[in-house]
Image (cartoon, helix red, strand yellow):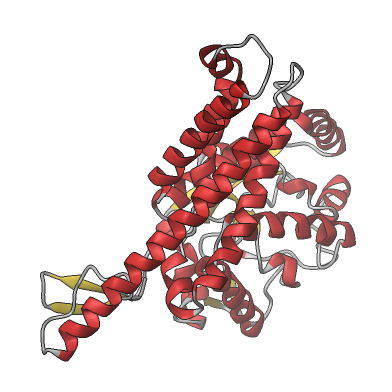
Amino acid sequence: MPLCDAAAIGLAALIALAAWRAGTASALSLGASWAQWSALIWTAVIVGPFVLYDMHIVRTLHAQGLAATLRGLGRRLLLLAGIIAVIAYAGRWLDQGGAAWLWGWLSGVVAAAVILRLLFAAWLRRIARDAATAAAAGGAPDQSSPTEERHSAMIGETLSVALLADRPIRRWNAVLKSSKDRLLAMIACVLLSPLLVLIAMAIRIDSRGPILFRQRRHGLNNSEFDIYKFRTMRVDVTASDAEIKQTVRGDPRITRVGGFLRRWSLDELPQLLNVIEGSMSLVGPRPHAVNMRTETRLGHEITDVYLHRHRVRPGITGWSQVNGCRGATDTAEQLRRRIELDLFYVDHWSLLFDLKILSLTTRVVLRATNAY
């Protein structure tokens, strides 16, 4: 499907260019037209398949039908059209005319995307009918049937096994999420560089010790990595006590500048470096410190599904944080609620879901709830 979408976007651009060239008095040839807008077209060919890709298309077609699938496609097409239009106008590609070509191109992309999904739905229905016919005749089920649910797998040709866990963000989705994370993180680092310098100076003036604080955290596949934060505690306690004791309200270990940074979550900004290096994501379950305990117990001792949160990269913000689970987890019930929200994110990830969480994070940070 992504390859078909890429081909359709490029082909729609060529057809729209030919039609525009035939209907204009411009002296531009088709080759000159392509040269003028080739950068924009190639950008759309590369970015478009990621935006249009729906990891749950089979499940949606099977459970909710074609109408729900097309509604989801419509949202993705609007996002893609907005991206292309913004890039076109911001890059001043259309200063010499060609707006009619742009909208003709986008119309072609919409038509091609819808047709591809209709063909895919018809192909899926045919496979489902073949599988039902084979089952009625006593034959073996088709192991390649897309109607099979991210919850079972086949070993060989006959043995079906249950999947206890699987990496939920794979292939195109993994590339899309990683690319989005790194791009936005690099842009944020550039835009926030004056603020980062001011914070570093304030920490240096307020108390002795390093500006940055590193701590071992659990990441993807339960691996460990060093998380970066602005130092908010006195240097004589950050190395040991901070790793085993969660911060409490009015904690005497926190410096004056540190209290301000923690209140507005500014101490988390260096984690943009973690995102750029690939150990974290902008959005995901918050990484817990190695050996962190709640009511004297480790997370996996409180709930059996604790480690499933490590099936994705941890994030600077997450679904649990924008739903009130921000700050320390003092009780087992608080931890269970946080894990429940984390796993909901893991199982329902999408690009739009990430963007929604990022927008909600701004509101949560401004409220400064449970931040200390």
User: Which residue is painted at 27% across and 79% down in the image?
Assistant: 129
The relative height of residue 306 versus residue 290 in the rendered view (above or below) is below
Q: Residue at x 86, y 35 (%)?
A: 202
Outermost residue toward the top in this view:
27
Q: Does residue 287 appear to the left or right of 88 in the view shown?
A: left
Is residue 273 visible in the rendered image? The answer is no
Query: In the image, what residue occupies the spot 69% across and 52% down?
Result: 237
On screen, residue 57 versus residue 314, left or right, reads: left
Quadrant where the C terminus sits is bottom right
Q: Residue at x 70, y 69 (%)?
A: 328
Which picture quadrant has residue 208?
top right
Say whether residue 184 is left or right of residue 29: right
Residue 126 lies in quadrant:
bottom left
Tell whether 196 sits left or right of 150: right
Above or below for 14 versus 182 = above
Percent position of residue 322, x then y: 74, 66
Residue 200: where, in percent of width, then height?
Answer: 79, 33
Q: Nearer the viewer, residue 103 or 58?
A: 103
Residue 73, image x and y in percent? 57, 59
Q: Is residue 23 visible?
A: yes
Which residue occupies the foreground of this view, 28 or 134?
Answer: 28
